[in-house]
Amino acid sequence: MANILFVDDEENILKSLKRALIDEKYSCYFADSAKKGLEIIKNNEIDVVVSDMRMPEIDGLKFLQQVQAISPDIVKIIQSGQADMYQLISVINTIDVFNFILKPWDIDLTLKPIINKAISQAKLIKSNKELNKELAEKLRELEIKHFRLEKLTESLEDSNSVIITIANAVEAKDMETNGHVNRVAYLSQKIGEKLELSHGEIDILMKGAILHDIGKIGIPDIILNKPGPLTAEEFEIMKTHTIIGENIIKSLKSFEGIRGIIRHHHEKLDGSGYPDGLNNGQIDIYTRIVAIVDIYDALTSDRPYRKCAMSQEQAFTILKNDVKKGLLDKTIVEILEKEILENPNSNFLTNSLMFR
Ligand SMILES: [Fe+2]
């Protein structure tokens, strides 16, 4: 319910107001001086003030100036006689007055309609204020979210820098495979897109592709860069790069999604791969993609044990043969072949690691 304060030094006017407004749907306060009026304002939530202009001690202008200072949202109405016109103009020019009522007034025809309008105005001011407050809170929340997002992006950039640094360290050690991780990541991304993987899934795929051989950091150089084929014993050591790789990243929560790619990129669909001999249903899509691109790039690049890189056609003959033997995923080999046929040099175009 709205609260209205009437301030007038003429007792008769206050009495007639009391009588006339007793049944109205708002609470009325009455003060016979500006001083008493200010006290009421300080102790109550007043929505509308109707003040006389000529009052002893503090006049209407000074009174409303103080009202404005105490509670600027109160809707202010002045009642005045014509003799006060110059003072009225100075009030209107000084204070935000909603309306003025010329004395003598008719309560029902003049006063009540103006008071009702003033109450609506007070409600509007209140609701605007609440909306502004809500808006400010939402903006504050947005600022906090934006700040958190910035921090998250920074940490993501840091984590991507770590990945690139590690991948570069692996390549520096395994000199003959220079550019291998770039090419595997690039082609894996292309296959992921053809398979309509989501942005998040392609991000996992690329990180896994870049770091799939991270475990080679733990393989002795003499084995890693040995010209010619490895002995059975050396090959057993080489196979451990999958487990070493997983151990390196397993404590990093942000790399959780790529553990499988690192550990299982040498598994075969028939269970003949390493280190766990997983079968078809146990190997996820990321690992299948990286495994095939890894083999393709190894076949088409010079390696310490085979200095003459194969042609793309020869590589696909081998891959398709492995599909027939039930070792590799047929669909992924087909997508890779299509990608290479459409863009024969695409895997050599990228020299920098990019994340979506
Ligand atoms: Fe590997």
Image: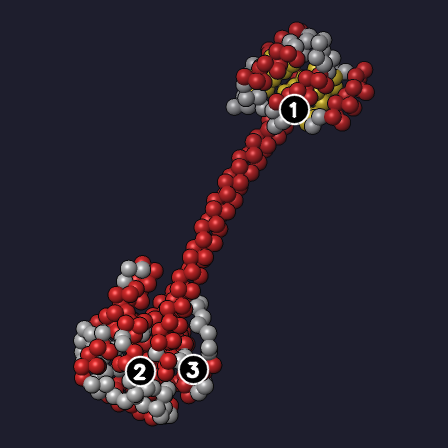
Amino acid type assigned to the residue bearing label 3 in the image = Asn
> Where, quadrant-wise, is the C terminus in this rendering?
bottom left
Disc 3 crowd rating (10 Å Cα; few below 14, some 14-19, many 20+) is many
| Of labels 2 and 1, the one closer to you | 2
Residue that mark 3 sits on: 347
Q: Position of residue 265 (x, y in %)?
A: 27, 75
Residue farthest along the top direction in this orientation: 11
| Position of residue 76 measured from the top left corner of the image (x, y, whole percent) | 66, 23
Residue identified by numbered label 2: 225
Residues marked 1 and 3 touching at CB (< 8 Å): no
Three-letter residue code for mark 2: Asn
Q: Secondary structure at mark 3?
A: helix
Q: CA distance from mark 1 to mark 3?
A: 74 Å
**From the viewer's perspective, is 258 left or right of 104?**
left
Determine whether, in the image, residue 238 is placed left or right of residue 172: left
What is the CA distance from the residue labelled 2 to the residue labelled 3?
23 Å
Mark found first going from the N terminus, 1 or 3? 1
In-front residue for pair 152/172:
172
Q: Amino acid at mark 1?
A: Gln
Q: Secondary structure at mark 2?
A: loop
| Distance (Cα) linking label 2 and label 1 | 85 Å
Residue 10 in view (yes/no): yes
Q: Which residue is mark 1?
A: 68
